[in-house]
């Protein structure tokens, strides 16, 4: 079974530029998550989708970040314009259920490492 | 709100040493508890989990027991290998009806020397 795919793996941009990340979850997984992981910290949830609907985006900085999951499969996360503090690893994860089961396992992609100069 | 505290790293051990990485949590009710591992250059992988008090999760020689009385979920391994070098994250998820987000510790970097 193929895992969660993400691209690109690395991205370097200058501040005020825009950037987009792509995620393809495990086939059949209804729930998709985007996390931001700053060096030395645990991941922080940015947004959670169930199919193509948003379940939780309470920690997404909506003035600069946007995400979509058209057709309930692939997803893109965009930052426009980027700031220095956006330098982090952006992780995509998926799970098979509705995202509401306490013991439900999330499967993570390799992440995209973003450096904003 | 829910929170997770894990011991700071890096933790440096010799091969075949005994490993303990402490994790304590604050949560209402009965959360599910997880250990994830992140090997260099790779994504996070679920190592083990426990969904109710006194459950023991185990995988690849690692174990952790869900202790409700001490609100802990310490990770242990009897004999570590160089290949265990990675960053280990403790996480919890609230039970149905509460916050379903995974709440993460800051991670503990483990370095195993041959």
Image (cartoon, coloured by chain):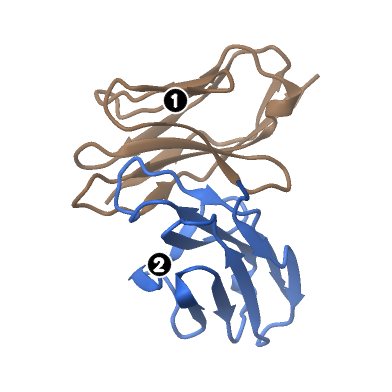
Chain colours: A blue, B brown
- The local secondary structure at tag 2 comes to strand
For the residues carrying marks 2 and 1, which lies nearer the camera in this image?
Answer: 2
Q: Which mark is residue B74?
A: 1
Q: Quadrant of the C terminus of chain A?
A: bottom right
Q: Residue at x 44, y 25 (%)?
A: B74
Parent chain of label 2: A
| Near-viewer residue (A117 or A72) | A72
Q: Does B104 sit left or right of B84 as displayed?
A: left
Within the image, what quadrant is residue B82 found in? top right
Within the image, what quadrant is residue B37 found in? top right
Q: Does residue A60 lie above or below B79 as drawn?
A: below
Q: Residue at x 37, y 44 (%)?
A: A104
Label 2: few (<14), some (14–19) or many (≥20) C-alpha neighbours in 10 Å: many
In the rendered structure, are the residues bearing label 2 and label 1 in contact, judged by CB atoms less than 8 Å apart? no
Q: Residue at x 32, y 32 (%)?
A: B51
- The local secondary structure at tag 1 comes to loop
Residue B28 % position (x, y): 21, 42
Q: Does B61 sit left or right of A103 as displayed?
A: right
| Near-viewer residue (B59 or A16) | B59
Q: Does residue A105 lie above or below B58 as drawn?
A: below
Q: Which mark is residue A34?
A: none
Residue B50 % position (x, y): 36, 30
Residue A109 % position (x, y): 61, 54
Q: Does residue A69 lie above or below B80 as drawn?
A: below
Mark 2 vs mark 1, CA separation in Å: 31 Å
Residue A28 % position (x, y): 47, 56
Q: Residue at x 42, y 39 (%)?
A: B5
Q: Does residue B29 lie above or below B102 as drawn?
A: above
Parent chain of label 1: B
- Residue behind mark 2: A49
Same chain for labels 2 and 1? Say yes or no: no
Label 1: few (<14), some (14–19) or many (≥20) C-alpha neighbours in 10 Å: many
């Amino acid at each position: 079974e193929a895992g969660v795919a993400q691209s690109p793996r690395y991205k370097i941009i200058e501040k005020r530029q825009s950037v987009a990340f792509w995620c393809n979850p495990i086939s059949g997984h209804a729930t998709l998550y985007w996390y931001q992981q700053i060096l030395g910290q645990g991941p922080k949830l940015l947004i959670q989708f169930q199919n193509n609907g948003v379940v939780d985006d309470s920690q997404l900085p909506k003035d600069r970040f946007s995400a979509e999951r058209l057709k309930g499969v692939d997803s893109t996360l965009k930052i426009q314009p980027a700031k220095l503090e956006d330098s982090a690893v952006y992780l995509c994860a998926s799970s098979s259920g509705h995202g509401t089961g306490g013991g439900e396992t999330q499967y993570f992609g390799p992440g995209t490492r973003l450096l904003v100069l | 709100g829910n929170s997770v505290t894990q011991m700071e790293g890096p933790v440096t051990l010799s091969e075949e040493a005994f490993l303990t990485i402490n994790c304590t949590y604050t949560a209402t009710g009965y959360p599910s508890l997880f250990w994830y591992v992140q090997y260099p250059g790779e994504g996070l992988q679920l190592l083990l989990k426990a969904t109710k008090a006194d459950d023991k999760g185990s995988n690849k020689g690692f174990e952790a027991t869900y202790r409700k009385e001490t609100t802990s979920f310490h990770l242990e391994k009897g004999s570590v290998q160089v290949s265990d070098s990675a960053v280990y994250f403790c996480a919890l998820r609230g039970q149905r009806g509460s916050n379903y987000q995974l709440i993460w510790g800051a991670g503990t970097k483990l370095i195993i020397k041959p």
